[in-house]
Image (cartoon, grey):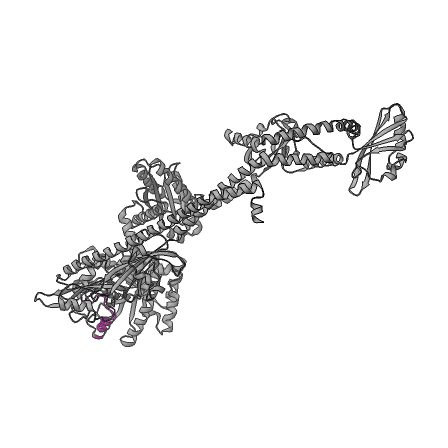
Amino acid sequence: MIMSYLFGSLKNRLILLLFLVALPGFLMVIIHVQQLRESAISVSREQARFVVQHSVLHQQQLVENTRHYLEILADTAAVKQPSSPACSDYLASIFKLNTDYVNLGVPRHDGQLLCSALPIEKPISVADRGYFQRAIEHRTFAIGEYQLDRAVDEVSINFAYPVIDDQNTVVGAVVAVVALNWWNQYLAESDLPANSVAMISDADGLVIAHYPLAKDRIGTQASSYSQETDAEKGPILVDQDGIRRVYFSSELYRTPSGRVISFSLGIPVEDEIAAASRQLYLSLVLMCGVMFLVLMMAIKGLKRGVLDPLSQLTRATRLLSEGHFTDVPLSQGAPQIMQLQQQFQDMAQKRLQAEQQALERNEELNSVFKALPDLYFRLADDGTILDFKADVESGLYASVDEFLQKPISEVMPESVDFAGHLQQLNQDKQSVAWEYSLDSPQGKQYFEARLNRIAGVEQSVMVVRNITAKKEADGRLELSAMVFHAMSESILVTDADGLIIDANPAFSQTSGYSLDEIVGKTPDLLRSGYQDKGGYEALWQKLIREGCWEGEIYNQRKNGELYPVWLTINTVYDDLGLPSRRIAMFIDFTEKKQAEEMIWQQAHMDILTGLPNRKLLGDRMKQELEHTDRDGLPTAVLLLDLDLFKEVNDTLGHAIGDQLLIQVASRISATVRSIDTVARQGGDEFMVILSQVKNMHVVNSISEELLHALSQPYLLGDETAYLTVSIGITLYPNDASNANDLIKSADQAMYAAKQRGRNCFQYFTREMQEEAVTRMQLIADLRRGVSEHQFVLYYQPQVLMVDRSISKAEALIRWQHPSKGLVMPDEFISTAEESNLILPIGRWVLEEASKTVQMLQQHYDPDFQLSVNISPIQFESLDSNISTWLQQLSSMGLSGQSVVAEITEGMMMSRSAEIREKMNAFKTAGVQVALDDFGTGYSSLAYISEYDIDYLKIDQYFVKNLTLSSDAYMLCKAIIMMAHNLGIKVVAEGIETEQQHRLLLDLGCDYGQGYLYSKAVDLGAFEQLLHDQRLPAE
């Protein structure tokens, strides 16, 4: 049955033949794609072989370099003394010069490791290591196996070279530790495909390293392919992650004991296999498509030339037998088929010619009735219905029996006066018409009836037309007219040529034009000029092309005022598809536009100054940098920071401060050029972008003008303020390659201007960047120092001048840095204050000082008093913990007079509420206050009296220059007299000589502090001073 189907028709035979022809092509495509797949996999195998072999060469080179390096180290003097600390210092100094090694060490001849580049956390012995034993015993270069190094706790290979002293004695071996991180770096730089993996396995087949890092694979058994060394036979395996990879392995290193370390690399071949599969799929699809097209063309030709003509001839024969024959078109088929069709056509035409003539006569009569509209009734002279013509399904609303041979008046609604209409017709009128309605299941239906006399007989004809649709259309038109006039949106109607036909009242109300003023004119009278001519041309072109347009434009009212509208234009087409009307509707959204502009202003402008904010500044910066890249003219960025603005804010209040910022913004804007950008960066920082800088004179000139303008007095109501500014300047593209780095550079330059003394400008330099990096490193070290408790307190005695007895001391902080040693406070306190790290440091100082003074009072002197320095930052911060510290003193049983708080003169000048509150808290708690470095700052007797100062500390600058005839002597005398008159005691700092002591004693100074008595010492040494009550020898 299958054979019968395949060979049963011409069409099936043709399809089978095409399949047989295409079969060899399918086989060739499959073979070709398989060859491409194998070729791609071979490339991956070759890449794996290349990387593995180069890794082995790198390992061999590393061994040779290490031997040479250790040979040189073994001959150095420091290395020949492995038990000396100098050996570790030397190794630590050269350790970072060679990044191939994770540690360097020199174990002694007994295997004890005392000399190491890295700190030794615990005792380490390598006496049991084979490589060490070989280097000592054979006095030669030795290599170990991969192992867990005891000093660095990493998987590594160790190299040793004997160290022989001048007496030809082996004193130890210099050892270099090489971790496996070299191969991670090498693989990362080898441009391997994504998802490549590599591993190093030991002689037992255990994984000791894996790339990328996979800790769960370390120590596990490597697969058998890790020992394969033939690239041609490199297997393709599916790993644990489900990815197929081709593998290649090679011997990486063979230990002296013959144990082999292997290196395996797997490169994924998923993409190659997938690409080959896609190629096969696309080729098969393409061949199928071509075969399908050929088959369709063949079937189409067969169908057109043979099958269709035969089908038409068969159909014509059937129709002719049924009496419904139609002309058979002559097909462009085989000549024999066309001849058969022609003969059949001639025979059929002769037969049907007579039938057609009779049919035409009958159709002429029916055409008369079909030409009459809708319903036809033939009426007798008295109105009886004699005959009708109608569509029975839809035209009649009653059955034929209900109205045929009955008076028409019984069929018509009662509201219709048919007798009257018939009488009008009989009065020599040719036609009478009227309208009426009927209720039907479809709703109320409306009709128009027209009565005409039939000439020659006493009869008439009544034609009835259903006009329901017309009535409804009239109603819709009336409703549309009502909506048109009542809509709040403006509507304008033009003809196809753009001449105004009509407009609704809302249009007149919005535009100011009456209807009479615009009819017959074009909408050009509304043009505002806001849009260019090209915009209107684009609008018109789209309207012609698509029949509609929608968008925002600006119109002009009759009074000349511009206003934004959202305009929608649609085209109405006639039956021929040509434009008939164009309807424009628009909404005046002036208020919405104003609201949007207000939102934009709030999002992009600084509310206080009206300048661009940080967001808009970023946009402007991006535009200027793009202009520089395009035009080649540099862009300069000036970062302005107001000097001591916080003091003005704290002194005069935030409201005055806001007025000051507004005036500053105005002065900056008035100083720069119109093409420049001025923005408020935030707080008291402003930024200026100078565009198109043709020479540096422009930048210098504007910077100097800014310094001058901003240093002038500020009249703020009843107050007058004085202010200066520090300016940091950076250039694009000289100093940075992007906006963020440009701002950072400007900030560093501004910081340098602050350091120079403020009220100046400073250009960015690379040295500033280095200083910033150093500063950031210092901040990072400070944070680590706080968390790791690296700070200690030293104590310097304050002696009673008359007998040099110690009853007081100043606690001085020191930083025990892990690598720099003991760091003095002048090297880190200012940075700690700038970074607010002074707060946790200050809290620790207060707590530690409290514990110390409690211990000293218990063991030495119950009235002992300890001075601590408190930073202004601690006073101003809400997080300084000073109030908690005062409570802690009370809970520890210490009186407030146990501690003296040392403050600076500059801090007293501030009128900050926080400072006043803490000073009052000191007074309430009984804590005494010392004014440090008196005479070098903003000294004011009013502030000294206001804050109830207990001690004045004469700065060591005056003491250093103190002689009987010096100005410093007179100043010290005046300070001591003034202090005593105010009831304040005096402490002189920096006393180093007996002469200075005697002069100050003669002047009546109360306490002395300096190297003459003792330098600052740790707590143990200070306790010894108290115990001995004598000065240490200098």
666 left or right, relative to 553: left
Between 394 and 650, the one nearer to me in the picture: 394
Q: Residue at x 31, y 73 (%)?
A: 854
Question: Percent x, y for residue 511?
Answer: 60, 32
Picture quadrant of residue 665? top left
Any part of residue 150 in sight: yes
Question: Percent x, y for residue 152?
Answer: 26, 65
Picture quadrant of residue 216? bottom left
Between 779 and 906, the one nearer to me in the picture: 779
Question: Residue 1026 lies in magenta, yes or no?
Answer: yes
229 left or right, relative to 964: right
The answer to whether residue 636 is above or below residue 822 is above
Q: Residue at x 36, y 41 (%)?
A: 709
> What residue span does the magenta drawing correspond to?
1012-1027
Question: Percent x, y for residue 278?
Answer: 43, 48
626 left or right, relative to 442: left
